[in-house]
Image: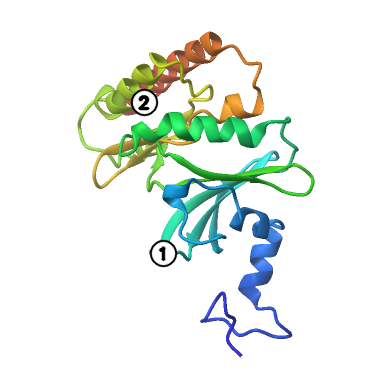
Amino acid sequence: MPCDRHPRAVAHGGYCPACLIEAALVPDLADAATARQPAADRTSGTRRLTVCLPLGGTARSSVLLVRDAAATPRLLRLKVWRTPADPGFLERFDELRMRLERWRGSPIALPLAASLDAAGCPAVLSEFRQGVPVLDAVRARRVDAGGAWTLLRPVIDVVLAMHQEGLAHGALVSGNVLLEVGSGSTHVLDFGLTTLFDPTSDPAALMLADRNGLAALNRAARGCRRR
């Protein structure tokens, strides 16, 4: 019989291959599906997420593309960590989400919801932004003849503007800055998550790290284009 979560898959004994892959990729997907979410983003008491494919990961975390089967289905980005968060994680997430809300529509991919599993390991659901790491796009010569500064300028502008409001990223590396090749738009992932995991971090130090990270990306992109 067809699986109720994956209609194109056949279920055996209540499970289908896609369900088993989901369980292997994200054992606590049920916790993510009932993640804390803002009222404006809530369409029902729980979220029903389906893993589409893994987007990447490290020893510390995994990132997945998921489909939210809400009234208006959409693709979202789910990041799941393998280590417990410090106490107060969800409260810090709520504060960050509210502070970032005014930046909706900007290059910042907004966080939408968060949860903790039984072991205290967090998951964060955010807007999905299509693209490839900006340096990968430059190396592959998939961008137009414009300079690296032109590609990064929207990101630089919004990050510096957010610094004026006391908000910092803290980990601006190529993997967190995406270029949508067709449109030339740039996007920033995981903004503010550094402070969620380390509430004692110095905002001034994080802002300096942001500026250094942007400068390093600009230098690296220019260097790639000269080769």
Q: Residues within 10 Å of mark 1 (few under 14, many from 20)?
A: few
Compared with 128, 161 (above or below) is above
Mark 1, secondary structure of its residue: loop
Q: Residues within 10 Å of mark 2 (few under 14, many from 20)?
A: many
Please state the horizontal and vertical placement of residue 173, each as a whole percent of the image.
49, 27
Residue 71 shown left or right of residue 106 in the figure? right
Q: In which quarter of the image is the C terminus?
A: top left
Numbered circle sitting on residue 221: 2
Mark 2, secondary structure of its residue: helix
Q: Residue furthest bottom?
A: 1
Among the 4 quarters of the image, the one containing residue 223: top left
Q: At label 2, which amino acid type do we have? A: Ala
Residue 101 shown left or right of residue 46 in the figure? left
Numbered circle sitting on residue 73: 1
Compared with 227, 23 (above or below) is below
* Residue located 65% across and 75% down the image: 17
Which is more toward the observer, 9 or 99?
99
Which is more toward the observer, 190 or 225?
190
Instruction: Give me the C-alpha separation between circle 2 and circle 1.
Output: 36 Å
Q: Which residue lies furthest to the right in this view?
A: 119
* Residue located 53% across and 30% down the image: 95
Q: Quadrant of the N terminus?
A: bottom right
* Residue located 42% across and 31% down the image: 100
Compared with 161, 9 (above or below) is below
Q: Are marks 2 and 1 in contact (CB under 8 Å)?
A: no
* Residue located 47% across and 48% down the image: 39
Residue 205 shown left or right of residue 161 in the figure? right
